[in-house]
Amino acid sequence: MPRTNSSLPLPVRALGLLALFVLTTSLTGYILFSNVTKTSFHGDEPGWISEGFYYVDLLIKRDFDREKWLNRKARGWGAFNLPLGKYIIGAPITIYSSRHWDGKKYYGFYQWNGGGYKEQKRKGNVPPDEILFTARRVTAFFGALTVGIVFILGYLTYNVWAGVIASFLLMFNGLFVETSTRAMIDIFYNFFMILFCIVAVWFLKSSTRWRRIFSSALFGVVVGLACSVKLTGIIIGAILFGLLSVYKMYVENKSRSDAANWVLVAMISSLVVIYALNPLFWISFGKIDAGALIKESRPLYKEVVREGIRKDEMYARYPQFANITKPFDFFNMFFRWKNNNKWQTIWNKGKMWKQSKAIEFNSDFLFKHATIWFQWIFFFLGFTIFTVKIIKSIRQSKVSPLSVTLFFFLVNYIFLFSTLGVNWGRWYMAIIISGDIIAAVGIYEAAIWTGRKIVRRPA
């Protein structure tokens, strides 16, 4: 689809796009910041605020003790999630506390079976309003930025009107407003995922070898940031980039080694970011003692062979081994994530699927969480347009940026449907955001078609 007003000089177009980015971001910011004190409280917010204080404090003290970073007492808010989201929440509230709260740090967790909100607040399981609202303003800021980059993605993949329509659909979406005004990490995760979609468009359009390599590396960096908020970021990013690499290889007749190089560069850069941001995976080289390590190896081998020792006990009794194997903790996190999903499914029976999962999942996406009740019509129209144009581009041996949004939607849709055990609305955000762009294209094309019919109608 040709860009609207593409005949205008580049500086004029750039200023126009910047103005629209600022407009959509500012309008969203107004909506979200107005709702910071109005959005209903969620029991997970104290956990993220507490861990924000906790992990930022560890960074400030440069305390990289493994057990402290695991923070087992915090359960799901501890090392189960990588710490970037907690850094983002924790840094502003730590600064606020140092200036307005005598440097005190809140640490408490909501007890789901411990009484109502007022009782929980009396017990200290709910943060003071000034801390809660400060943390919420951080998420609101990222929510506003998310709408701004959705406008950019809509423009890059279709045209400026698709970007504007998509941004308006998102900023007035009730679930988006709720997610962006709670002190939780979901909006950070979605922000970085939409950001790597923008980088993916650049990758598809790259015409030189070095641009392809550089855009692959940049894609990996942003995937690393998404993964450092939520572990699943690297799963979504890896699948999406793999699909786009195969697509680009096929359409542009590139070699398999080229595609493998792009994927390898993206994977390496993502792992570099993940390991750089997560001290839990850092080896303490100053604590390595070769003699002690040799002494540990023999009894450790015997206990592992007998399988009579738990992993936690192994780390406690064999500190040298625990130290040098820290980098492998990242891969262990995928097993924790899988086990946590099972635990959540058992614990949160009230949020289980009330009917067929396929029916309820699609009903929630198409109707319950839609911005306008008839949006599903434009979504399917847009989905058809995306599919037809991508097939047409393949036949013409041209890559289409539409594939980024469509593949991103499909990857998240399939991943969520296959792994979602608990029906929590905020987990739909990735398909809602990409679905809004697809629906925006449907709305735009329907409006253009209707306008042409009206103009051609005889007087």
Image: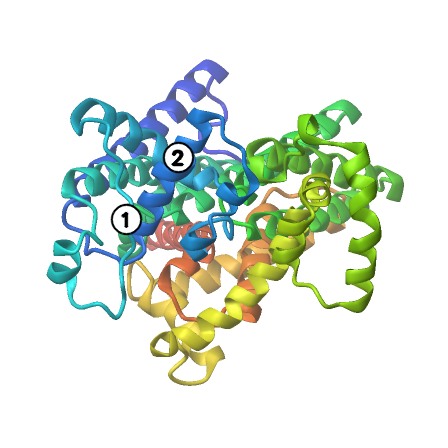
Marks 2 and 1 close (CB-CB < 8 Å): no
Determine whether 164 is above or below 349 in the image: above
Dot 1 falls on a residue whose secondary structure is: loop
Q: In which quarter of the image is residue 418?
A: bottom right
Residue farthest to the bottom? Answer: 355
Residues packed near mark 1 inside 10 Å, few (<14), some (14 to 19) or many (20 plus)? many
Amino acid type, callout 2: Ile
Question: Coloring scheme of the render?
Answer: rainbow
Of residues 368 and 135, the one drawn nearer to the viewer in this rendering = 135
Q: Position of residue 9 (x, y in %)?
A: 48, 16
From the image, tell me which residue sits under label 1. 182
Give me the residue at 49% from left, 23% from top: 7
Label 2 crowd (10 A; few <14 / some 14-19 / many >=20)? some
- Residue on which the image places disc 2: 88
Q: Residues under labels 2 and 1: Cα distance? A: 13 Å
**Image spot of residue 124 (x, y percent):** 19, 51
- The residue drawn where x is 70% and y is 46% is 328
Q: Is residue 368 left or right of residue 404?
A: left
Between 458 and 34, the one lying in front of the other is 34
In the image, what residue occupies the spot 38% across and 44% down? 51
The spot of residue 72 in percent (x, y) is 47, 53
Left or right: 432 as drawn, with respect to 253: left
Which percent across, then down, holds residue 379? 44, 61
In this view of the protein, which residue sits in the foreground, 288 or 128?
288
Q: Residue at x 52, y 72 (%)?
A: 342
| 349 to 375, vertically: above or below | below
| Among numbered discs 2 and 1, the one appearing first in the sequence | 2
Work out which quarter of the rendered image holds the N terminus and state it: top right
Tag 1: residue type?
A: Arg
Question: Residue 193: in sight, yes or no?
Answer: no
